Image (cartoon, rainbow, N blue to C red):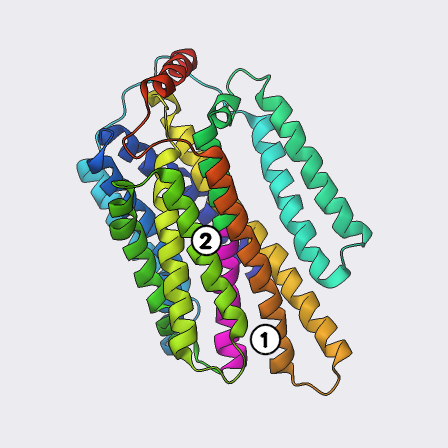
Amino acid sequence: MEIPCLATARALQGLFAALLAPAALSLISLAFPEGKERAKAFGLFAAIITSGGAIGLLLGGLLTDYLSWRWALFINIPLSLIPVAGAWAYVARDARPQRSTRLDLPGTVLATVGLVALVLGFSEANSRGWSDGITLGAIGLGVILLAAFALVQARTRDPLLPPRILTERNRAGAYLSATLGLLSLFAVTLFLTYYLQAVKGYSPALTGVAFLPIAAAQVIGASALGTWLLGRLSARTVMAGGYLIAAASVLLMTSLDAGTPFAPTLLVAQIGLGVGVGAALLPATSLATYGIGPDDAGVASATINVSQQVGASIGVALLNTVATNATAGYLAAHTTVTRSVALVHGYQTAYVWAAAFLIAAAVVSLLLVSAGRRGPSRSEQKPAKRETTGAR
């Protein structure tokens, strides 16, 4: 009974978080004009988003060690009351829409079930193998359902994800690069947690403290460094550079073993990963609503949030399977090694994959993102104007 209740509660938590995040991002897009002020606002938003996971690990470790793991869930109640009070006091009431829209139920079902099937397939490969029928069936079903979702979106009156959102190259580059970047970030964070506790013997509280450097680096990368760089360089340069710095930092983690001290290797790698991803996600988050009118601000903001969450889910499932299979294969080939050595080998293999995805995010940024540091040119504004008119 406990597990179904926990799963239901977590699902509801994710549902309402999915409603909250795009609403906050669209408010920023509409409240701040193009330019320096909007860049600062997006920088602060990106810093909060990227550092939240690391701060959560710190608080979760402290609560688990000194109270109970249940408090890691209870703490969300008082934390959620703060933004509720702020929204009630400062966010103006929305104007009534000019026309009512219908929930795209077929699109919602296809997208949800398709993503669940895809993540399930990657997870099942962990225990069943990549050639197992259930693994291939789940992945194949996920791909088919997501393809059907794309077809439905092109034909329905009120699509869940209007195709016009993805056809602009800067937005497409932001969504895809964010997916690849968060795919790597969340998976690497998970493996570092395993490494610190299972290999190094850290307690949950000490593990949380060990993640403070990456949390601080993400805040600095997004709110300070990223904003400063965007005033001097193009968005794609900042994004590509950030992802490449993050990739180099993850590759540095492949040198970690059971006897490696926390500093300097892991400390430097954490700082590089945090600064790189934080700086890259700032322009990616800003470009999520590039050229979008007020009618599409919500769905464009939701898309960047979904990109990050989908990347995180797929990354954890896929790279956890890669690490587990590499560990099992190493144990089978080296019968005399300890479990810690085999675990480290599995993590190292996953780090290489994570770095490859970060490099792919950099390539996507270079190929698709064309917006300059001073905003869209006149030639770039015209298509956006026609698109916005059509959206209304």
Q: Observer-nearest residue: 76 or 327?
A: 327
The residue identified by callout 1 is 344
On whether residue 148 falls in the magenta region, the answer is: no
Q: Position of residue 53 (x, y in %)?
A: 40, 58
Which numbered disc flags the more N-terminal residue, 2 or 1? 2
Tell whether label 1 touches label 2 (CB within 8 Å).
Answer: no
Q: Is residue 15 left or right of residue 124?
A: left
Residue 129 found in image quarter: bottom right
What's under tag 2, amino acid-wise? Leu
Q: Nearer the viewer, residue 154 or 179?
A: 179
Secondary structure found at label 2 = helix
Residue 136 locus on image (x, y percent): 77, 48
Does residue 200 appear anywhere in the picture?
yes
Q: Quadrant of residue 198?
A: bottom right
Say which of 28 and 366 sits in front: 366
Residue 224 image position (x, y, % from top left)? 24, 51
Q: Is residue 196 magenta?
A: yes
**Res. 68 mark:** none
Which residue appears at 48% of the width and 57% of the height? 247
Identify the element where label 1 is drawn: helix
Quadrant showing the N terminus = bottom right
- Residue 244, which numbered label? 2
Residue at 52% in and 51% down: 359
At label 2, counting other C-alpha atoms closer than 10 Å, the crowd grade (few under 14, some 14-19, many 20 or more) is many
**Magenta residues, start to end:** 182-200
**Measured along the vertical axis of the image, is residue 244 above or below residue 163?**
below
Q: Gap between marks 2 and 1, in whole Å? A: 23 Å
Quadrant that contains the C terminus: top left
**What amino acid type is highlighted by mark number 1?**
Val
Q: Is residue 35 above or below residue 69?
A: above
